[in-house]
Amino acid sequence: MLTLDFTGSTVLVVGGTSGINRGIAEAFAKHGAKVAVASRNPQKVADTVAALQELGAQATGFSADVRDYDSVVAGVNQVVAAFGPIDILISGAAGNFPAMADKMSPNGFKSVVEIDLLGTYHVVRAVYPHLRRPGASIINISAPQAVVGMVGQAHVCAAKAGVDMITRTLALEWGVEGIRVNSIIPGPIDGTEGMRRLAPTPEIHDACRKSVPLKRMGVPEDIANACLFLSSPLASYIHGVILPVDGGWVLGGYAAVASAMEPLLRAMPARDKN
Ligand code: NAP
Ligand code: COA
């Protein structure tokens, strides 16, 4: 059986305190890496660091809002002081709520774009000086909304499409230094906050499961395994790629979920104050 060993590597997972990203942090911890996590909520950071240490890893973390560049820089500096240069960055902090474009407020749209898109830029910008080169790997966690339009997701579609264009541009700019940059597009991952928001009823959840060509929802380990591979020497020539890890969902299944959600979304009251 193939095993990957990240002993001696430092991994920073931004947004690593819950859901998919926490699964990624745990996978790197189980494979020998020193792992740092970051998110807004200090209690979630402390709990995750303790859980990673229980897995036997050296772990640390910091609390920051990715919309605040200075606090991201300060946190990254703490990680580097504790663990040295960063080998692998997973940037996955995100916010989402389903709402039709004409019913969300401009501030609602702005909040998601600032977390997902501006936040991704802040994170890669703050980590860039501290990446160990050559050999470093950046993975931005994108979403199917980057590739297809989705009802109730104008903000996320705009933001995640931008995230993938950051990935492609950095691949061009930083590849010369031996820094690989890729995106992963998770499909619908069961038990996550994202799916609680996007598939809020048992009926929509079931429609979602059936809409995946492999006929199962994903689990965080599916995304974590892809991150392990993509950050390893096995993927040393994979660069600037936007990789769906979704059981084939982006081939068309998302449309069934969107149409199941549409009546709920159309019935929601507007938040726009004007
Ligand atoms: P989640 O559990 O809500 O994870 C989001 C993480 O980001 C949390 O650690 C959260 O912690 C942090 N975060 C949110 N806003 C932040 C901010 N402003 N600054 C810093 N940290 C922030 O969500 P998830 O469903 O697992 O999604 C994880 C990633 O996968 C996201 O990038 C999402 O777009 C992507 N994705 C998810 C799915 C899915 O099926 N769930 C599908 C496709 C793509 P705090 O609250 O402590 O800040
Ligand atoms: N429907 C419509 N608008 C909403 C909304 C919803 N369900 N939830 C929040 N908003 C709007 C608010 O009304 C506000 O706009 P306003 O000032 O014009 O009223 C704006 O979004 C910001 O809301 P606020 O709660 O102040 O934002 P925040 O910065 O504290 O949180 C969110 C950001 C809204 C994205 C929040 O849901 C969050 O923190 N999410 C992180 C977890 C997550 O989304 N996980 C899934 C990842 S896929």
Image: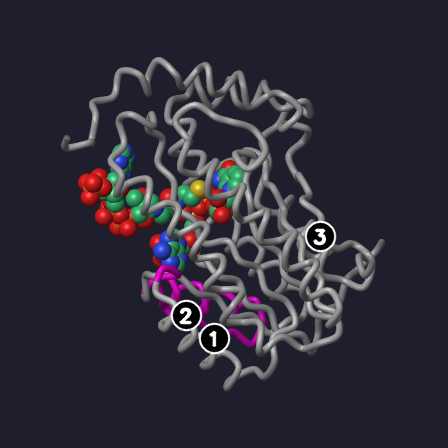
Q: Which residues are magenta?
A: 43-67
Q: Please, what is the three-letter code of the amino acid marked with disc 3?
A: Gly
Find residue 35 and report its horizontal and vertical position in percent. Answer: 56, 70
Asked if the stretch drawn in magenta spans residue 96, the answer is no
Q: Residue furthest bottom?
A: 81
Marks 1/3: CA–CA distance: 24 Å
At 49% from the left and 71% from the top, the residue drawn is 126
State the mark number for residue 240: 3
Q: Dot 1, how many residues are within 10 Å of its Cα: few (below 14), some (14-19), or many (20+)?
A: many
Judge whether 164 appears above or below 145 on screen. below
Q: Which residue carries the number 2 mark?
A: 72
Residue behind label 1 places its C-beta within 8 angstroms of ligand 1: no
Q: Earlier in the sequence, mark 1 or mark 3?
A: 1
Label 2 close to label 1 by CB (< 8 Å): yes
Q: Dot 2, how many residues are within 10 Å of its Cα: few (below 14), some (14-19), or many (20+)?
A: many
Asked if the stretch drawn in magenta spans residue 51, the answer is yes
Of labels 1 and 3, the one closer to you: 3
Q: Please, what is the three-letter code of the amino acid marked with disc 2?
A: Val
Check disc 3 and report its element: helix, strand or loop: loop
Judge whether 113 appears above or below 69 on screen. above
At 34% from the left and 61% from the top, the residue drawn is 40
Q: Dot 3, how many residues are within 10 Å of its Cα: few (below 14), some (14-19), or many (20+)?
A: many
Check disc 2 and report its element: helix, strand or loop: helix
Marks 2/1: CA–CA distance: 6 Å
Q: Quadrant of the N terminus?
A: bottom right
At 69% from the left and 69% from the top, the residue drawn is 136
Q: Nearer the viewer, residue 124 or 249?
A: 124
Q: Please, what is the three-letter code of the amino acid marked with disc 1?
A: Val
Q: Earlier in the sequence, mark 2 or mark 3?
A: 2
Label 2 close to label 3 by CB (< 8 Å): no
Find residue 43 and report its horizontal and vertical position in percent. Answer: 32, 64
